[in-house]
């Protein structure tokens, strides 16, 4: 198997392993399957290591409208699981708290794991939670999920960034925690762009011009992220790849590569990365596990060349997170 370098900006594997007894996972019928090292989900550390040097942003997705547990309690429980797993499997995975250490972790043959948060709802109305995030090693926070929280509104709602949300953004920037705009609605996006001082991410978002789902970015939004030195992760979720896709077999390589092509046409050669959304959505059947990234890489090389493939799969994301520590 050809060894490739991977840096993936988003997955939901921690939730699918640790939070299956909490709604909505308990309603989905998701059951625990092993642990971070070995499991039956899309991502498992042992399988990732066999592909090649692999850096993974492990998101804690905090669902909207929790009933049996508070958003902060949800975050803490999933965080505790992540930290315990990293400690238990220290010979195979290391949490990266500063991207400048990433290369040394990969050189040891370990998976480099970055902790991220999807949905800023655990912050509530307490900026002190951001200090907790920083202490825990959180490197990126998606401001919203689909609905509204104290910070802003997701794509199912229409409000922009709140006054408290502006304080949250400043606090995240001060702690070098990347602000992530995936799920943020259009009003909130432009509110944010008028105030940010540091490069931002859209960790798992495609382009609306190729697939019209409102979760995707407009061309102008993508250009704004690029112009600000940010990063955008290509999302494998079939609903965000092709209009009308309902089954894993409905999305081809050509459908996904159409987003890459437009990213490049818009000047994104050094701003695109992978944002698989593994273990959080339905992905194409030809790209539904860690191992299939190898074939995907080879097809990207064949279509766009080795330089673009290497930037998409690893180099751009690595450079972005290293810059975040130093600029």
Image: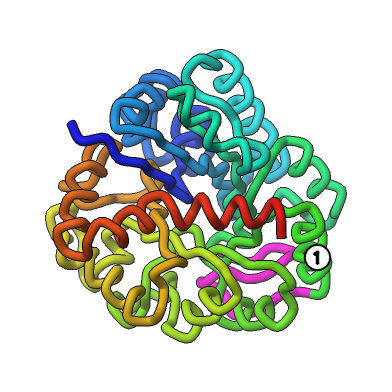
Residue visible at 18% across and 49% down? 298
Report the residue that reaches farthest toward the bottom.
Answer: 220
Horizontally, is 185 left or right of 197 in the view?
left
Main SS of the magenta part reads loop
Horizontally, is 306 left or right of 54 in the view?
left
* Image location of residue 166, percent across then percent down: 79, 71
Residue visible at 65% across and 61% down? 179
For label 1, the residue is 170
Horizontally, is 236 left or right of 218 in the view?
left
* Image location of residue 191, percent across then percent down: 68, 81
Q: Nearer the viewer, residue 134 or 92?
A: 92
Q: Quadrant of the N terminus?
A: top left
Mark 1 element type = helix
Where 190 sits versus 273, above or below?
below
Where 17 sits versus 324, above or below?
above
Q: Indicate yes or no whether the magenta region holds residue 223.
A: no
């Amino acid at each position: 198997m050809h060894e490739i370098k991977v840096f993936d900006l988003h997955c939901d594997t921690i939730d699918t392993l640790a939070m299956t007894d909490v709604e909505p996972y308990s309603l989905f019928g998701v059951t625990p399957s092993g642990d971070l090292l070995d499991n039956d989900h899309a991502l498992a550390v042992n399988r990732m290591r066999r592909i090649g040097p692999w850096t993974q942003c492990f998101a804690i997705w905090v669902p909207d409208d929790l009933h049996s547990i508070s958003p902060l309690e949800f975050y803490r429980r999933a965080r505790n699981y992540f930290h315990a797993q990293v400690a238990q499997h220290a010979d195979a995975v290391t949490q990266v708290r500063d991207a400048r250490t990433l290369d040394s972790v990969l050189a040891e043959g370990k998976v480099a794991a970055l902790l991220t948060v999807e949905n800023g709802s655990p912050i509530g109305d307490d900026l002190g939670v951001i200090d907790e995030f920083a202490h825990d090693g959180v490197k990126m926070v998606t401001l919203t999920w689909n609905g509204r929280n104290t910070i802003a509104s997701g794509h199912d709602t229409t409000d922009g960034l709140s006054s408290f949300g502006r304080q949250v953004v400043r606090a995240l920037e001060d702690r070098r925690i990347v602000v992530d705009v995936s799920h943020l609605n259009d009003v909130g996006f432009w509110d944010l762009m008028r105030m940010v001082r540091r490069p931002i991410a859209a960790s798992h978002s495609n382009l609306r011009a190729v697939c019209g789902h409102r979760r995707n970015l407009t061309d102008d939004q993508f250009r704004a992220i690029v112009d600000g030195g940010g990063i955008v992760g290509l999302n494998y979720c079939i609903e965000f790849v092709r209009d009308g896709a309902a089954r894993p077999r409905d999305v081809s390589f050509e459908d996904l590569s159409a987003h890459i092509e437009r990213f490049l046409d818009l000047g994104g050669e050094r701003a695109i990365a992978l944002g698989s959304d593994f273990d959080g959505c339905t992905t194409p059947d030809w790209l539904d596990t860690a191992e299939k990234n190898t074939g995907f890489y080879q097809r990207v090389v064949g279509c766009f060349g080795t330089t673009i493939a290497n930037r998409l799969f690893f180099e751009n994301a690595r450079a972005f997170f290293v810059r975040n520590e130093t600029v």
